[in-house]
Amino acid sequence: MVFVFAASSNAFASPKVLLNESVNAESLNFAFLSQVFAMQVRRWPNGVPIEVFMLPKNSEVHREFVLRRLKIQPHQLDRIWNRMLFTGTGKAPTVVESEADMLEMVRTTPGAIGYVSVGFPVEGVTALEGERP
Amino acid sequence: MNASASVLLASLLSLALPAAALDLNGNSEIHGFVNQAYLYSPDNPYGGPTAENGSFKFREVGLNGFVELTPDFRLAGQVLSRRHGSVDDGDARIDFLLADYLVLSNESMAFGIRAGRVKNNIGFYNAVRDIPSARPGYGVPQSVYFDTFRDSLLSINGVNLYGSIFAGDTHISWELSAGEQSVDSESVEYYAFGRRIPQGEADDVPIRLFHIDVRPGFQRNLRLGLSLVDVSIDLKDTQSTAGAQAALIADAMDAGTAMEATLAANPQRYVTGASIDGLFALASAQYSFEKWVLTAEYLNVETDFDVQLAGLDTSNTNTTEAYYLQIEWLPTPLVTALVRYEELYLKRDDRSGGESAIDYSPYRGFGKGWTLGGKWMFADHWTLIGQASFNEGTAWLPNYNGIENENIEKYWDYYVLSLNFQF
């Protein structure tokens, strides 16, 4: 049991951020990252429009990503998106159903940002890993 | 339900059936909700007499959409229908309809402009007070968001400038709005006199708003906000001075009292002109910690009243004050529970409300209350919402045409159960 728990917690350790190769960034600070996922920043520094992708709200990878990489509670983001949608001031990220879909969308969409769990193999995108626990 | 609300509901449901949220082509989406509540208010007529025996006349329907024409330019609109007992009849209305142009956005700041009908960001909840999924419990805190100015402050027809600044890890967002809004003069009359006046309508009034929201870098789970709103209301087409004086003389003779006493007893009957200047200041703080969210807001409203009674000018200033403290607990991502305590004083220096007391409603000058609430998202798109409120004083008991014929109790509870569908 201890073994399984350790393995799964490692799998969910600080999911890695994925960037489309049109985005020039070697690191992103969590405050900026959290504003990107809160849909408050709409262009990358090089001018390319930002396209944000997320896994379903109830997925463990999403929750770990928000907690560990954005350093806020998942419900805070939910509330921000809901508020923007129903006050006409913005929208929520595009939801993809799996990590494979996430990789594909980020790889093929200019300006895209997303995330996958740390152990998920990726290719053709820029991956930014978080700090090691 | 009236015809327009039925059409809205039918079109909303037909849109909702085939899919969850409608993503039309990646650059536009349609969303909406239907919320049906059952409200039981055994002690006082909450929003109308039927609630005293339990009422289903509390229903909200909304449908919105946006289209992004370019990454920086978007159009958005929302239609709402709100049936709220005898207070709101469910007529469909345009909640917002705006064009939004993002002028500038980079890693250190953003700046944009919206024009059209734009929702007013006042405190945490004003802009979403008609959105069931965004409210804490069934309703927004009634102390700070009391009904008198709700329609006047919901939105403006005008211009909204918005922006944000990153200073290190600190994030500051701000808004400036200026425009006009039509005023529900009846609710202002109840606020000022406790009754309607015989004649008088408010024109569209000018509103200016400033809002700032800060997430400090040293504590990212903290949000601090300040909202300032300036609004001026003039009542037009009130009765003539001659008519009011004639009515005053006739009433005094009928009652066999002096004219001064007659005037003092029912000032609202002799209003020949009125204007109200209001300055709202709302301070907000919210702290999120793991499964807990603590929220507190404080409202201060300074009003300058200029009222002409049967041709005689009177004026006074008043301060209305309110605050609430709220604790939300989110044991799972699908469940929220909350407890809230709040107070509202129409006149800050008259805590017992004696100066605001009128014959049918002796406790309208103050309100104190506890609220327990819960939300359970039991399936995708579906949420069950419950709330129980225990109140002393009736400052936030909604006014409606006919409330002056009721006996208003000092201690009153109400209970709500509602079902919300949102896509």
Image (cartoon, rainbow, N blue to C red):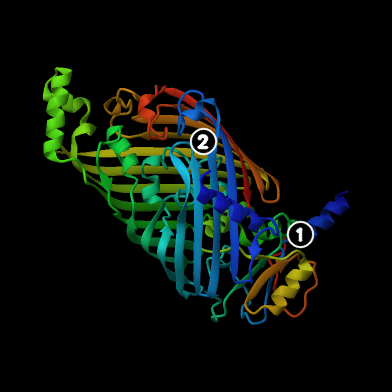
Q: Is residue B280 left or right of residue B104?
A: left
For image coordinates 27% across by 52% down, the residue present is B203
> Considering depth in this image, is A115 or A1 the residue closer to the camera?
A115
Q: Residues within 10 Å of mark 2 (few under 14, many from 20)?
A: many
- The residue at which mark 2 appears reads as B340
* Residue drawn at x 40%, y 61% as measured from the top left: B175
Q: Chain of mark 1?
A: A
Q: Identify whether B310 is placed above or below B127.
A: above
Dot 2 and dot 1 residues touching (CB under 8 Å):
no
**Viewer-proximal residue among B401 and B115:** B401
Above or below for B398 versus A26: above
Q: Residue B254 appears in which quarter of the rendering?
A: top left
* Element assignment for label 1: loop
Residue A121 at x, y percent in the picture:
80, 72
Residue neighbourhood size for the residue with mark 1, other residues' Cα within 10 Å, grouped as few (<14), some (14–19), many (≥20): many
Number of numbered tags placed on the structure image: 2
Residue B106 falls left or right of residue B330: left
Residue B364 screen position, x and y as percent: 35, 29
In the rendered structure, the answer to whether residue B185 lies left or right of residue B12 reads left
Q: Is residue B381 left or right of residue B396?
A: right
Residue A92's place in the image compared with B328, above or below, is below
Q: Chain of mark 2?
A: B
Question: Dot 2: what SS?
Answer: strand
Question: Which one is nearer the viewer's eye here, A76 or B404?
Answer: B404
Let me know if residue A126 appears in the view.
Answer: no
| Residue at 36 percent of width and 57 percent of height | B210
Q: Name the residue at 42% across, 32% down.
A: B397
Residue kind at label 2, given as amino acid type: Arg
The one nearer the camera, B283 or B113, is B113
